[in-house]
Amino acid sequence: MLKILGKSPSINVRKVLWTCAEIGVPYQQEQWGAGFRPTDDPAFKALNPNALVPVMVDGEAVLWESNTICRYLARRHGRTDLLPTDAFARARVEQWMDWQLGDLNNAWRYAFMALVRHSPAHTDAAAIQASVAQWNGLMAVLDRQLERTGAFVLGADFTLADVVLGLATHRWYSVPMAHASLPAVAAYYERLSQRQAFLLHGRNGLP
């Protein structure tokens, strides 16, 4: 059976769990990471030398990097609705997944570490303010895209782009900071909340 190694609270682990739920793939999960089994354990590092979650084990196939795992699962199970086979359609999905992983993640990192993790290494007020401003600015980019599509990130159909950006939207709402007024993002968040898999692995009980 498919194995997912990583703690459930991790946003990157939840990408994989949500994808599994959308596809209907059974899996066994092992809780690794802070507060659970340490990822510097040699057995874990033999699977991922970066000592980061998640790791996927599918028979002899071992993968790390959450977005890569999600793409693998969609292809493995023939879910062309989540990740199209047409070259351009697939590239558009992956474009937004890469944007989440690069631009959006980098924007929120300082603010998240300061305001949620209360990291002593992230206490510079100007840096926090700059991170919040950049984060809001990039969420406004998403808002404009959703205003154009009127539904999900790429249009009427739910794709893997919505898995990674749906979780990013949840993170944005859950951090105690000033949030830009983004009506299309708000409608998107409620639209995602009609999906049972998002309620299980994305929204996490947030009202």
Image: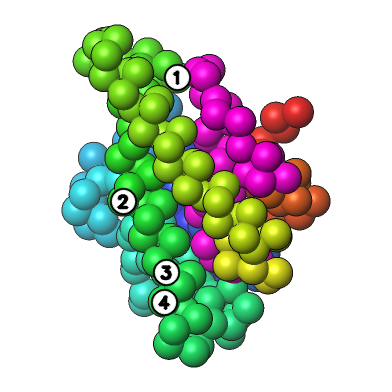
The numbered disc on residue 103 is none
Q: Residue at x 46, y 33 (%)?
A: 136
Quadrant the N terminus occupies: bottom right
Seen in the picture, residue 10 relative to 65 is either above or below; the reply is above
Q: Residue 153's x, y, as percent?
A: 58, 61
Which amino acid, by three-letter code, is at mark 3? Glu
Q: Secondary structure at mark 2?
A: helix
Residue, disc 2: 102
Seen in the picture, residue 92 relative to 49 is either above or below; the reply is below
The numbered disc on residue 91 is 4
Residue, disc 3: 94
- Along the horizontal axis of the image, is 44 left or right of 16? left
Residue 153: say if magenta. Answer: no
Nearer to us of marks 1 and 3 is 3
Q: CA distance from mark 1 to mark 3?
A: 29 Å
Proximity of marks 1 and 3: CB atoms separated by less than 8 Å: no
Q: CA distance from mark 4 to mark 1?
A: 33 Å
Residue, disc 1: 116
Q: CA distance from mark 4 to mark 2?
A: 16 Å
